[in-house]
Image: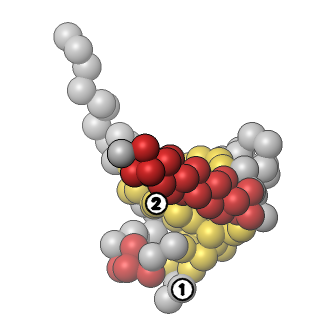
Amino acid sequence: MKATLLSLFLAMMCLFASIGLAQQAKGKQHTLKGKVTEVSKDRLTVDHGDVPGFMGAMTMPYKVDKVDILSKVKKNDQIEATVYENDYTLYDIKIVPQYVDSKPPSKK
Ligand SMILES: [Cu+2]
């Protein structure tokens, strides 16, 4: 029983340690919000807002974590993604609904 608990504990420690290392290698995590200005076969060019602590607002190309997103995202789509410092790759890209012509539903 004790041995089981100990090995479970050690397994957990290994898991946490490897997660910690992975994050350290990737750098600090930020959320990037912006508008897609171009979709290429392996990249998305995004006109993004200020990413505090990482970079200012600009338009630049980014790699993507999964290429299948490139067939879903269209020009002018509003997106939100996770970025890591020193890694110009967009992770976990989400297409954000736009309220350009219609206002978001009000509570009235
Ligand atoms: Cu940028």
Residue at disc 1, secondary structure = loop
Determine whether, in the image, residue 5 is placed left or right of residue 13.
left
Between discs 1 and 2, the one toward the N terminus: 1
The residue that mark 2 highlights is 92
Determine whether, in the image, residue 64 is placed left or right of residue 62.
left
Mark toward the viewer: 1 or 2:
2
Residue 35's spot in the image, x, y percent? Answer: 53, 57
The residue sitting at 79% across, 51% down in the picture is 55
Asked whether 7 or 25 is in front, the reply is: 7
Q: Residue furthest left?
A: 108
Asked whether 63 or 23 is in front, the reply is: 23
The residue sitting at 20% across, 10% down in the picture is 108
Which amino acid is tagged 1?
Asp
CA gap between label 1 and label 2 equals 15 Å
Neighbours of disc 1 within 10 Å: few (<14), some (14-19), many (20+) = some
Determine whether, in the image, residue 29 is placed left or right of residue 53.
left
- The answer to whether mark 1 and mark 2 are in CB contact below 8 A is no
Asked whether 66 or 20 is in front, the reply is: 20
Image height check: is 41 above or below 35? below
Determine whether, in the image, residue 52 is placed left or right of residue 94.
right
| Residue 35, visible in the rendered structure | no
The residue that mark 1 highlights is 42
Q: Residue furthest bottom?
A: 41
Neighbours of disc 2 within 10 Å: few (<14), some (14-19), many (20+) = some
The residue sitting at 46% across, 60% down in the picture is 92
Image quarter (top left, top right, bottom left or bottom right) of the N terminus = top left
Q: Quadrant of residue 95?
A: bottom left
The residue sitting at 28% across, 37% down in the picture is 102
Asked whether 4 or 78 is in front, the reply is: 4
Which amino acid is tagged 2?
Asp
